[in-house]
Amino acid sequence: MTRSAPIPPGSTIGILGSGQLGRMTALAAAALGYRCHIFSPDEASPAGQVAAAETVADYTDHDALASFAAAVDVVTFEFENIPHESVQLLERLRPVRPGWQALQVSQDRLVEKDFLRSLEVRTADYRAVAGPEELAAAAADLGGEGVLKTTRFGYDGKGQVRIRPGTDLNDAWREMGGRVGILEAFVDFEREISVIVARSADGSEAAYVPVENRHKDHILHMTLAPADIAPETAAEADAIARKIARSLDIVGLLAVEMFVTKDGGVLVNELAPRPHNSGHWTMDACVTGQFEQFVRAVCGLPLGSPERLCDATMTNLLDRDVDRWPEILSEPNAKLHLYGKAEVRPGRKMGHVNRLDVSAKKD
Ligand code: AMP
């Protein structure tokens, strides 16, 4: 099969990971006539509930991965921490989109930052640190302040410790919990934004407008679409996201999280080669939502228009916020999305609500 030959409706998309991103991908895929087969170690998962087929097995179970590959036409994933050997095995059997390069870069914050630097994309200043002594030297180097992060498996602020003058660095190292860390200079940002760009195997691209992301306790709380930033800043953010997507040869989606500094500069914080929480607003406020766009890109279909139909905000419903579903349903311009998670845990993403500003339609 050539790289850009379409995988037609009726085919089966294999998805590694079974959370809400997989669920919403499976729903969008079904609307285009595809079947999805979910692979993850979890029983009764959000994605498994809505998919045509599900394999419950560990990501390192090579027999299960081989049977999964035999049952699908293309493989993608809804999170990036897939072991390299598993991706290699799958790549020998079926197209994996995006491929290993995008995963490898986004699995490790140090590899990611070095890669961004190699593209001359600006990031916060950073130092690799392998222990408390190196941390002390790096903190001194970066002016005594920073954010210590594990290089691998960190998400939603987990494995992150704020470093200030006087912070006990031995405690900070223990709290971070990783074997290798990265100390980033603290960015006194004006706002956080992100751009999601879709890219096809034939090189065609479509990017959503930059949005602003507001966090609470390191977890995304709200996305405001569009971001209230200068047109030049928006153009720079868009150009950066496209440049990274091309350099990683993304086939699928790439979300690029960025800081806008007080002088209007744009620094890249993090990459995610998949649908992203900050793109959930597109489901109801754009011609083509991010999950449909993801399916189109992965299956080699023409990309849809990312055009914004109206302004919108997306608010995550974390743990007990979900109990507000009846009031949300009675709001005239609110669109409720629930993830089918039975168990409420502190900080767990249970759903989200998109509030559409239908009076702010684009001209
Ligand atoms: P991350 O897991 O890297 O996306 O970080 C989670 C959140 O922590 C970000 O969205 C920021 O709000 C904050 N943060 C991360 N890195 C920095 C930094 N270098 N300077 C200031 N704030 C940061």
Image (cartoon, grey):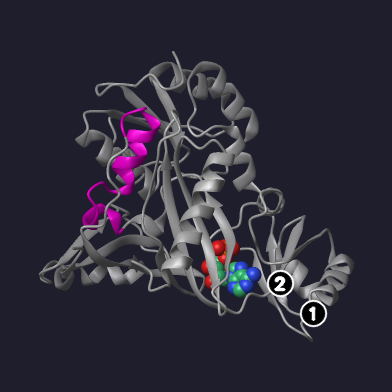
Q: Which residue is mark 2?
A: 185
Residue in the foreground of this view, choosing between 354 and 311: 311
Q: Nearer the viewer, residue 60 or 85?
A: 85
Q: Can you see residue 346?
A: no
Q: Is residue 231 visible?
A: yes
Quick check: 355 left or right of 137?
A: left
Q: Quarter-wise, where is residue 209 in the image?
A: bottom left
Please determine whether, in this image, residue 276 is positioned above or below residue 182.
Answer: above
Percent position of residue 8, x then y: 28, 21
Ligand 1 sits in quadrant: bottom right
Q: Residue at x 34, y 21 (%)?
A: 6
Q: Secondary structure at mark 2?
A: loop
- Residue projecting furthest to the front: 232
Q: Which residues are magenta?
A: 281-302
Give above or below for 89 relative to 296: above
- Asked if the residue under mark 2 is in contact with the one under mark 1, i.e. CB atoms within 8 Å, the reply is yes
In this rendering, is residue 167 above or below 285?
below
Instruction: Tell me: is circle 1 under 8 Å from ligand 1.
Output: no
Q: Which residue in the protein does label 1 denote?
A: 143
Q: Is mark 2 within 8 Å of ligand 1?
A: yes
Number of residues whose C-alpha sits closer than 10 Å to that of mark 2, classed few (under 14), some (14–19) or many (20 or more): many
Q: Nearer the viewer, residue 264 or 11?
A: 264
Residue type at the position of mark 1: Gly
Dividing the image into 4 quarters, which one contains the N terminus? top left
Membership of 282 in magenta stretch: yes
- Relative horizontal placement of residue 244, taking residue 150 as reference (left or right): left
x and y, in percent, of residue 21 in the image: 38, 47
